[in-house]
Image (cartoon, rainbow, N blue to C red):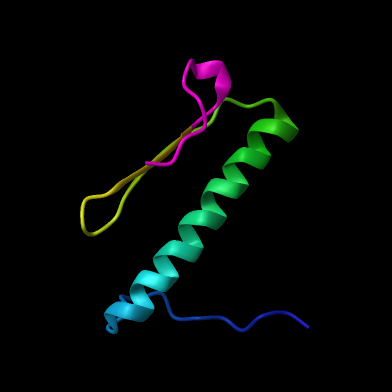
């Protein structure tokens, strides 16, 4: 059984919004790492939170290590 569809809109509750951001950010970074490994692709991602905190990932071929700041 699949998951239900959600309406894509801003989450009003700040706690729920932060939890969703964290989970989806981690999922995005995980998928990017998988794409890099499985397909030998060069992948780079930069994500800024609403507080301005930076999260990034780069393939090792891009002369930058996988990192999260």
* Residue 25 picture location, percent across and down: 46, 56
* Residue 52 picture location, percent across and down: 21, 51
Q: Residue 49's image quarter?
A: bottom left
42 and 68: which one is in front? 68
Q: Residue 36's image quarter?
A: top right
Q: Residue furthest left?
A: 51
Determine whether, in the image, residue 2 is placed left or right of residue 33. right
* Residue 2 picture location, percent across and down: 72, 79
Q: Which residues are magenta?
A: 58-69
Residue found at x 44% / y 63%: 22
Residue found at x 40% / y 65%: 21
What is the chief secondary structure element of the magenta stretch?
loop
Q: Quadrant of the N terminus?
A: bottom right
Magenta residue check for 42: no
Q: Is residue 1 above or below residue 21?
A: below
Q: Is residue 65 above or below residue 54?
A: above
* Residue 58 picture location, percent across and down: 49, 29
Residue found at x 37% / y 80%: 16
Residue found at x 37% / y 41%: 69
66 and 25: which one is in front? 66
> How many discs mark residues in the rendered view?
0
Q: Is residue 58 above or below residue 35?
A: above
Q: Is residue 63 above or below residue 26?
A: above
């Amino acid at each position: 059984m699949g998951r239900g569809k959600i309406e894509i809109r801003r989450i009003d509750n700040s706690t729920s919004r932060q939890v969703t951001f964290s989970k989806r950010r981690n999922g995005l970074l995980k998928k990017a790492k998988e794409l890099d490994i499985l397909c030998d692709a060069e992948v780079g991602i930069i994500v800024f939170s609403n507080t301005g905190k930076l999260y990034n990932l780069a393939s090792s071929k891009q002369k930058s290590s996988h990192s999260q700041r």
